[in-house]
Amino acid sequence: MSTRIWAIVEKEWAEMLKNKMIVVTMALLPILLVGMVLGTIFFMQRMPEDEVSGSGAPPLPPQLQHLDPKTAFIIVMNDQYMFYFMLIPMTLPVYIAAYSIIGEKETKSLEPLLATPIATWELLTAKSIAAVTPAVVLTWLSFLVLLVGAWFIATDAVFLALIRPVWLLAMAVLSPLFALLSVLSGVIASSRMNDPRAAQQLTGIFIVPVIAVSLAVLAGKIFVDMQLVLYAAMVLVMIDLLVLYFAVKLFQRETILTRWK
Amino acid sequence: MIETRGLTKRFGDVLAVDNLSLDVAEGEVFGLLGPNGAGKTTTVRMLTCLIAPTDGEAWVNGHKVGEEDTAIRRCVGILTESPGLYERLNAQQNLALYAKLYGVDDVAGQVEKYLRMLGLWERRIEPVGGFSKGMKQKLAIARALIHEPKVVFLDEPTASLDPEAARLVRDFIVEVKGEGRTIFLCTHNLDEADRLCDRIAVMRQHLIQVDTPARLRQSLYGRKVVVQLQEISPAVLAAVRELPFVHQVQQEDRRLIVRLDDPEAQNPILVRRVVEAGGAVQFVTEQHHSLEEVYFTLINEERAADSRTQEAVQ
């Protein structure tokens, strides 16, 4: 990584750590989600079988037919939660990304920053890395906490379903790529709008496709396997690069400096 | 070191800088004066490659604006109108960030050098948000110098500072000037410009006048000598007016204000003539015009010319 990119990343993290509210609020969502998944596993395992797999339950995917209906249903529920885990790195850094350029403009630190030899792509990459990394690390940490908790309370079948290679791959690869997409969109919004609230709202739109896919999985319309995760990862890499390209193209130094008040 | 030829910047229909041609020599402290909206900040932004000129050409340290922007950014430092520091970070972190962005080899050493020079070393780990305005401004100037640039652009370096802080900043600029850097100073503080600048330019969208403060005074007012007498008689007044080298004589109370070309050579003759005519000379001194007078004369002449042009068009 270039020295300039790393310098900006370091600066962003140092500023982030000085703002305790950002750190606390970032940690809240993963903690809640871990609690929700573990709570679901814990209580559903203790519920009578007919209550869990009653007539209102969605159809079970064929690969889970060999399991007892209650275990299979808990696994389907957990698969659904895995999508929410992927939403964490998309939602956590949104505010940071939306504020990335607008914040610099508001504190009047953007002009001296742009007067340095830093290239636009370096600046935007640095801003994105700085916003994505804590969110991804928090997601991975919370997933680890979930696994440790599940190891204690879940049945073997439920636990093994959580550590299926497909989810580990999704968590390791898709989650940062989704996060990067969300953050880059936030950075674009931040460099085109002069109000962080508007930028933040616009970034929220990118969460919709992930929710749609998760609903399709719950409805049994899509089955998540290794092939799908790999294809999704390749597509996301291309989309992320494309979005970075557009972010650089759309970053108008002159407009930001002279027209934003 | 800095050269502009017909540099022009338009924002839509608004002409911010019009056909500006300037030359700033290496090691010179060059002051750019003008009212609010005169185009000073826009000029600095064009020369530091923050915004692109609409027309014209400019070179900084031999690099052409618009073609070698990264090279220019590497060799210039800029103090913007507002310090724009990261207030949650400390002084050391603020300077270290810019040292890294400019590719300084010895980041820690360079940061320490400037923090010690500014007397901020003892407070290096305090968040900048708690610093006084003067300290922030000094830190912002240090940030502009952290990579030892050849050209430094200072936009209103003492604006909104109390007199003590302004003096600290001015003293620091004098130190920087002593290091032989080229300094391009935009200021509203005419006294500051007078003290610091080798040459000044007065602009209002376009260049009105550029020269040394002394030559600007002379070109506008000539050199004037004040002769104070116990009493001014008509004979004394007539005797002075008769001298061939006297361009103009004004009487103010018991003082004669005499416009001359070369007071060093002509004063002895003038004083002798006054005494011969019966005048009792109390003291003789040269009248000084402040840069403020020069500035307002130029700006007012410019405004009057604009009004005449507009009337003629109508």
Image: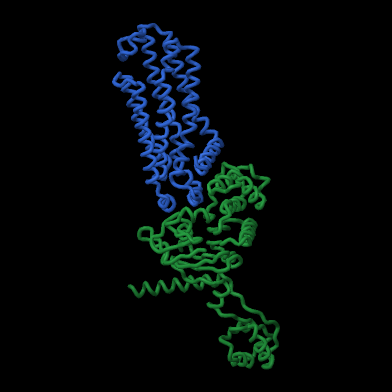
Chain colours: A blue, B green
Determine whether, in the image, residue B236 is placed left or right of residue A90. Answer: right
- Percent coordinates x, y for residue B240 in the rendering: 61, 90
Q: Is residue A260 among what the camera can see? A: no
For residue A67, above or below residue B186: above
Name the residue located 36 percent from the left edge and 35 percent from the top edge: A238
Frontmost residue, B15 versus B102: B102
Determine whether, in the image, residue B101 is placed left or right of residue B173. Answer: left
- Percent coordinates x, y for residue A169 in the rendering: 41, 24
- Percent coordinates x, y for residue A121 in the rendering: 43, 44
For residue A234, above or below residue B138: above
Q: Tag count in the figure?
A: 0
- Percent coordinates x, y for residue B75 in the rendering: 53, 56
Q: Is residue B114 among what the camera can see? A: yes
For residue B265, above or below residue B146: below
Q: As drawn, which residue projects farthest toward the left?
A: A221
The quadrant in which residue A46 appears is: top left
The quadrant in which residue A168 appears is: top left
Name the residue located 42 percent from the left edge and 11 percent from the top edge: A157
Frontmost residue, A118 versus A148: A118
Determine whether, in the image, residue B241 is placed left or right of residue A145. Answer: right
